[in-house]
Amino acid sequence: MNFKELAAEVFIAESIGNNLILFDIDDTLLKAQGIKLYRKLPTDKEEVELTPGEYAKEKVTPELKQYYDYRDFRDPVKVAESIKTSLPIISNLKILDNYIKNGWTVGLLTARGLEDVIADSMKKWLKHKNEKGDLQSIGDKLVRELVFGMNDSNKKYEGASDFDKKANVIKKLAKKYDRVVFYDDDLKNIAAVKEMVEKENIKNVVARVAKK
């Protein structure tokens, strides 16, 4: 471990102050079930179904976004069910657990829309271990105001792409918290946050690639 990595670990381990841990949802905390995205590029002979993980690997520029259909993610019933029946990614949930034990505030930062549905569904689905090691509901540890859906139809997040929007949300949160740590499986999101941090000379934000 080099000095830079060691400094990051110390930064994350410290619990003094008003600190925020932010997690992406899909393919970071969970693998959603029964929900798809759809692509019909001019080069596609027919509509192509994509899982959230497959969609994350697509190079969706603002110009190409018109060829993608997000209808499942605009259906509140399907969105809620995709979380309720999802498969947990244990390695990252353990990381979240450690932050909660150290007194960090919890937030979610996702490219999904339907923020209210996401917040309600994740509060019911997400669990953490108490001091006795027993699993219990995340409850009030997940604050509604700290659940951000970049494609929510009732809000306008600044940015040309989902990863730009995430970086801009984190930029604003960095002014309110002593430390902000962000976990995401998508390298585009991590790169956008790191670029923003360097450009703005922000010292209290760390972006980390979520475990698979």
Image (tube, helix red, strand yellow):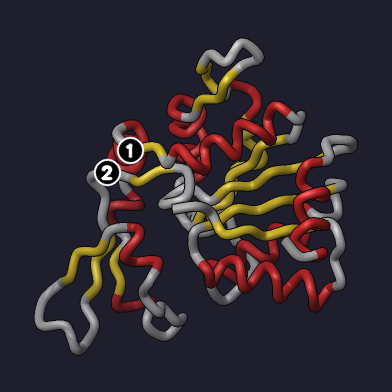
Q: Nearer the viewer, residue 38 or 24?
A: 24
Hey, what amino acid is under mark 2?
Answer: Gln
Q: In which quarter of the image is residue 209?
A: bottom right
> Dot 2, crowdedness within 10 Å: few (<14), some or many (≥20)?
some
Determine contact: label 1, label 2, CB under 8 Å.
Answer: yes
* 6 to the left or right of 40: right
* 29 to the left or right of 145: left
- Residue annotated with mark 1: 86
Q: Residue at x 35, y 46 (%)?
A: 31
Query: In the displayed image of the protein, which residue is found farthest to the left?
Result: 45
Number of callouts in the render? 2
Query: In the displayed image of the protein, which residue is found farthest to the bottom?
Result: 43
Report, in whole angstroms, how far the alpha carbon at label 1 lies from the one at label 2. 5 Å
Q: In this view, does 79 lie above or below 156?
A: above
- Location of the N terminus by quadrant is bottom right
* 209 to the left or right of 69: right
> Dot 1, crowdedness within 10 Å: few (<14), some or many (≥20)?
some
- Residue annotated with mark 2: 33
Q: Which residue is drawn at 33% across and 38% down?
A: 87
Which of the marked residues, 1 or 2, is nearer the chain's N terminus?
Answer: 2
Q: Position of residue 38 (x, y in %)?
A: 24, 66
Q: Where is residue 116 in the image (x, y as percent from the top left)?
A: 50, 38
Q: Which residue is drawn at 87% across and 47% down?
A: 178
Answer yes or no: is residue 141 visible: yes
Q: Which of 32 and 129 is in front in this view?
A: 129
Q: Position of residue 144 (x, y in %)?
A: 62, 35
